[in-house]
Amino acid sequence: MHSKFINTNGIKIHAKIEGSGPLVILVHGCPESWFSWRKQISVIADAGYTVAAIDVRGYGQSDKPYPINEYSLKKLANDIVGIIDALNFETAILIGRDWGGPIVWHTALLHEDKISAVCGLSVPYFRRLNVTPIDLFKQIYKDRFFYQIYFQKEGVAEKELEPEIKKYLETTYFSIDYRGMSDMKNGVFSTTSDKSSESGYLEGAPTYDKYPDWITKDEINFLVTQFKNSGLRGPLNRYRNYDLDFKEMEHLSGKKIKQPCAFLAGSHDPVNFFILPNGYKDSNDLRVNIEPQYENLVDVALLDNAGHWVQEEKPNEVNEFLLNFLSKLG
């Protein structure tokens, strides 16, 4: 595995590259980096693929444009297409998790000729609503705290969280993995909370005496170093583009994804409870709820005893799912 800096869409994107064969691009979520795929890269490469695990713009060693509108879904999709071209491939298979999900789903919609198949983890494809997600969140949460609303004010979350990077990462990772979701009495502090909308992100944050078994202190420290170097403006700017995304993606309203697709989530992922108040019963229930968004939904799985960081919490099961999906693409 080696690092490569790729010129794409007017910026440089850092990627970890391994293997040979058809191109698979791995796209992380927030707050992560290429490192969140450390348990998948070699497995997929050994199965006969060229794997490019990228730092999304704004993260890690990739460029970090300052303007908010540099982090729209359209810009991020164009980054992916530029990576495909720069690596001298005609097409690519995309795998994305968390914010990486919307990025890969919309890249497939905007550039159908460049994307041969798509897999999402944690966040399924949602067709365009009649209101922006932020307006919907404001209607739902009103005077209660919700992290995505909190992130909208430029500089506010940065001021709170950048001096407390380690606490921010530990809080975010540990509160919505399987253990955190199982322990919380009133939902997830950073997702649904009884605290006031005037509160900060870390106010009332849970503390854990012991690290979960899916991540080590050394791995957390590696991520802390990355985010201390990169800051949080880029990652937070993604949340600040809902209005622009809503406008730029209007022409996709009602459109289904044509390419072969797969989707996997953990049984205790908080995203599930955004979609259904009680989450999904099983894999079949998950399929029934998301299948109308796709023309060719090949594989669906709901992994028991897994939270939001599913590819790290359950790497063996996720790797088996991904390799099975890839094997069906011919």
Image (spheres, helix red, strand yellow):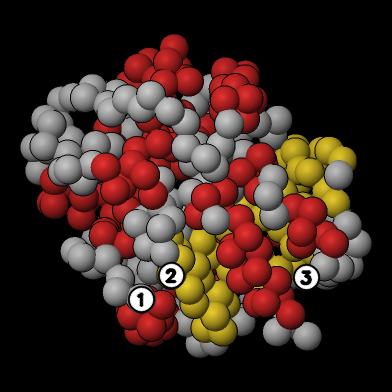
Task: Give the residue type at disc 2.
Answer: Leu
Q: Earlier in the sequence, mark 2 or mark 1?
A: 1
The image quadrant that residue 90 belongs to is: bottom right
Which quadrant is home to the N terminus? top right
The image shows residue 14 at horizontal and vertical percentages of 75, 38
Please tell me how crowded label 3 is: few (under 14), some (14-19), or many (20+) other residues with Cα within 10 Å. Answer: some
Residue at 68% across / 50% down in the picture?
A: 39
Residue at mark 3 to residue at mark 2: CA–CA distance: 28 Å
The vertical placement of 272 against 327, above or below, is: above
Query: Marks 1 and 3: CB-CB under 8 Å?
Result: no
Which quadrant is home to the C terminus? bottom right
Residue at mark 1 to residue at mark 3: CA–CA distance: 33 Å
Q: Which residue is denoted by mark 3 in the rendering?
A: 91
Query: Marks 2 and 1: CB-CB under 8 Å?
Result: yes
Q: Is residue 2 visible?
A: yes
The vertical placement of 302 against 70, above or below, is: below
Task: Give the residue type at disc 3.
Answer: Thr
Q: Which residue is denoted by mark 2 in the rendering?
A: 302
The image shows residue 327 at horizontal and vertical percentages of 74, 80
Q: Give the structural element (helix, strand or loop) at label 3.
A: loop
Q: Is residue 65 visible?
A: no
Q: Which residue is denoted by mark 1 in the rendering?
A: 282
Residue at 38% across / 83% down in the picture?
A: 284
The image quadrant that residue 116 belongs to is: bottom right
Badge nearest the viewer, 1 or 3: 1
Q: Nearer the viewer, residue 146 or 7?
A: 146
Q: Earlier in the sequence, mark 1 or mark 3?
A: 3
Residue at 57% across / 49% down in the picture?
A: 312
Q: Give the structural element (helix, strand or loop) at label 2.
A: strand
